[in-house]
C-alpha cells in the first residue's frame, strides 16, 4: 500500500528544479553565483508556510604564506523557519555551494544514460535540496503537519568546511528533536553514512631570527629547522584513533641567510572526541617545547572544524526510523561508517540525532564525472516525506528531554 502522502510528489518538477539550479555556477568562492542561487532557492521555498531569510556569513580568516591573516569572503545562507512555536521541531540542512569554481571546465549537464544525469552539483547537492523541498511540500499538503515545526538551512560554504555557517548550524540545531541533512547517499545503492570521523586544519607560523650563514650563524634561529622538527614530532603523535598529515611547508630564502620565517599547514582526522581533545592539548605542549628548544615563536591558526560524529542511542533510533520507513516503501536502507565529513558532524556535536545522507543516489562527487540517478529524486523524497510524517506523529519524541 502506497502511503497517501506520496501521491503529492511531482518527479518532473523535481528534475526541473535540479536542472535549473545546476545551471548556476555556485563554486564556494563565486559570490555572484551564490547570490543568484540563494534568490532562486528563496523563490522556490516560499511555497512552504514560513519566512525565508538570507543570513550574512560569519567572518572567516585564512593565513597567508607570510604569516598574516586575511579575510575570506563567503555568500549568504538561506534560513527558513516554519511553525517555530511547535513543541516538536526538526532541522533540515543542505548546501548550495559546489567544489567547481567559475573557471572549472565542468559546467554543463549531460544525459549519461536514460535516467542518469551528469552535471556539477546534481548529486552534491542540488538534487538533495530538491528532495528537501518536495518532501516538505508533500508533508504540508498531507493535512497532518500542524504538530511539527522545522527550520531549514541551506548554507553557502559547506565545501570549504562551513566556517562561515558553523555558528548558525549550532544555533538552529539547538532544541531540535532530530536533524536530516541531504548529502548524497554514501553509495549509489542508497546506503547511508553512519558514524563519521572528524577533521581539523591547522597553520603554524614559526618566527626565528635571521643571520648571515657564514659570518654569524650562531646568532640565527632557523624557523625552517624548527618547522622540520615540528613535522617529525607531529607525525609521531599519530595513533590508532587519529591520523596527522603535514601537508605544506612554506618559508626560507637565500642560501646564505638563516631563515627566520616558516608556515606549516597540516590536517588531522580524529576518529573520536577523546582523540580530538587529546591532540589539541598535546599540540599546545609541543609548540611550547619547539619554542623553547629552538628559541623561536610559534603562532597557531585553525583547529578542528568538524568534530567526530559517533552514533549514540538517540541517533541510532533515527537511523532505525529511516530504515523502517524505507522498508514500508520497498527500499532496503543500510548504513556504513565513513571517513568523510559534512555538516552532520557539526549537528551531532550539538547532541542532536542526525542522518546526514538523506539526499539522492548518485556518485563520483567532487569530480567531473558527478552523476545523479534521476529516479532517486522521487524515491528519496518519498522516504523523507514518510520519515517527516512519522516524526509529526510522535516518533522519537519519547527521547526528547
Ligand atoms: Zn555535499
Image (cartoon, grey):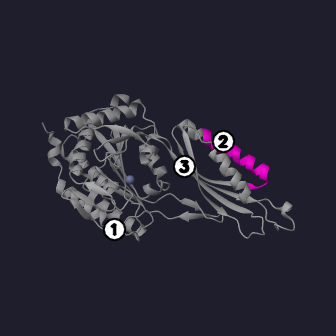
Q: Residue at x 82, y 68 (%)?
A: 212
Label at residue 282: 2
Q: Please give left or right for residue 371 compared with residue 27 in the image.
A: left
Q: Which residues are magenta?
A: 278-297
Name the image quarter holding the N terminus: top left
Instruction: Tell me where residue 224 appears, x and y as whole percent.
Output: 71, 59
Residue for badge 3: 200
Q: CA distance from mark 2 to mark 1?
A: 44 Å
Is residue 207 visible in this depiction of the protein?
A: no
Q: Secondary structure at mark 1?
A: loop
Q: Nearer the viewer, residue 228 or 262?
A: 228
Q: Nearer the viewer, residue 330 or 7?
A: 330
Q: Quadrant of residue 60?
A: bottom right
Q: Residue at x 27, y 55 (%)?
A: 372
Is residue 41 visible in this depiction of the protein?
A: yes
Q: Quadrant of residue 388?
A: top left
Q: Please tell me how crowded label 1 is: few (under 14), some (14-19), or many (20+) other residues with Cα within 10 Å.
A: some
Counting residues from the start of the chain, the first of labels 3 and 2 encountered is 3
Q: CA distance from mark 1 to mark 3?
A: 30 Å
Label at residue 227: none
Counting residues from the start of the chain, the first of labels 1 and 3 encountered is 1
Q: Nearer the viewer, residue 215 or 372?
A: 215
Q: Please give left or right for residue 65 compared with residue 188 in the image.
A: right
Q: Residue at x 75, y 63 (%)?
A: 260
Counting residues from the start of the chain, the first of labels 2 and 1 encountered is 1
Asked if 64 appears above or below 361 in the picture, the reply is: below
Q: Residue furthest top?
A: 398
Label at residue 107: 1
Instruction: Tell me where residue 49 appears, x and y as whole percent.
Output: 27, 51
Q: Please tell me how crowded label 3 is: few (under 14), some (14-19), or many (20+) other residues with Cα within 10 Å.
A: some
Q: Secondary structure at mark 3?
A: strand
Could you tell me what secondary structure mostly forms the magenta stretch? helix
Amino acid at each position: 500500500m502506497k502511503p497517501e502522502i506520496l501521491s503529492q510528489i511531482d518527479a518532473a518538477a523535481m528534475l526541473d528544479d535540479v536542472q535549473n539550479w545546476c545551471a548556476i555556477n555556485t563554486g564556494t568562492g563565486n559570490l555572484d553565483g551564490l547570490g543568484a542561487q540563494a534568490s532562486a532557492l528563496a523563490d522556490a521555498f516560499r511555497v512552504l508556510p514560513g519566512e525565508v531569510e538570507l543570513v550574512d556569513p560569519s567572518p572567516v580568516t585564512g593565513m597567508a604564506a607570510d604569516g598574516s591573516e586575511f579575510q575570506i569572503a563567503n555568500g549568504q545562507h538561506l534560513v527558513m523557519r516554519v511553525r517555530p512555536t511547535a513543541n516538536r521541531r526538526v532541522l533540515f540542512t543542505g548546501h548550495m555551494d559546489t567544489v567547481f569554481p567559475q573557471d572549472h571546465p565542468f559546467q554543463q549537464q549531460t544525459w549519461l544514460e536514460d535516467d542518469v544525469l551528469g552535471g556539477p552539483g546534481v548529486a552534491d547537492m542540488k538534487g538533495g535540496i530538491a528532495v528537501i523541498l518536495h518532501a516538505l511540500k508533500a508533508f504540508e499538503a498531507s493535512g497532518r503537519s500542524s504538530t511539527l515545526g522545522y527550520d531549514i538551512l541551506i548554507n553557502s560554504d559547506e565545501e570549504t568546511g562551513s566556517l562561515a555557517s558553523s555558528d548558525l548550524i549550532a544555533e538552529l540545531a539547538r532544541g531540535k528533536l532530530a536533524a536530516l541533512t541531504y548529502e548524497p547517499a554514501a553509495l549509489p545503492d542508497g546506503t547511508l553514512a553512519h558514524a563519521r570521523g572528524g577533521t581539523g586544519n591547522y597553520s603554524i607560523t614559526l618566527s626565528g631570527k635571521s643571520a648571515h650563514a657564514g659570518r654569524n650563524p650562531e646568532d640565527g634561529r632557523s624557523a625552517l629547522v624548527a618547522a622540520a622538527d615540528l613535522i617529525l614530532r607531529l607525525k609521531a603523535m599519530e595513533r590508532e584513533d587519529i591520523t596527522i598529515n603535514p601537508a605544506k611547508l612554506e618559508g626560507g630564502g637565500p642560501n646564505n641567510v638563516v631563515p627566520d620565517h616558516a608556515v606549516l599547514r597540516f590536517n588531522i582526522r580524529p576518529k573520536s572526541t577523546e582523540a580530538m581533545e587529546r591532540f589539541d592539548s598535546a599540540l599546545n605542549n609541543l609548540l611550547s617545547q619547539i619554542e623553547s628548544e629552538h628559541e623561536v615563536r610559534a603562532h597557531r591558526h585553525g583547529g578542528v572544524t568538524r568534530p567526530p560524529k559517533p552514533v549514540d542511542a538517540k541517533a541510532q533510533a533515527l537511523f532505525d526510523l529511516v530504515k523502517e520507513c524505507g522498508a514500508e516503501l520497498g527500499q532496503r536502507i543500510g548504513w556504513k561508517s565513513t571517513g568523510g565529513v559534512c555538516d552532520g558532524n557539526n549537528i551531532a556535536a550539538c547532541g542532536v540525532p542526525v542522518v546526514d545522507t538523506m539526499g539522492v543516489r548518485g556518485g563520483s562527487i567532487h569530480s567531473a564525472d558527478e552523476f545523479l540517478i534521476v529516479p532517486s529524486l522521487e524515491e528519496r523524497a518519498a522516504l523523507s516525506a514518510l520519515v517527516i510524517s512519522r516524526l509529526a506523529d510522535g516518533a522519537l519524541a519519547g527521547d526528547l528531554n
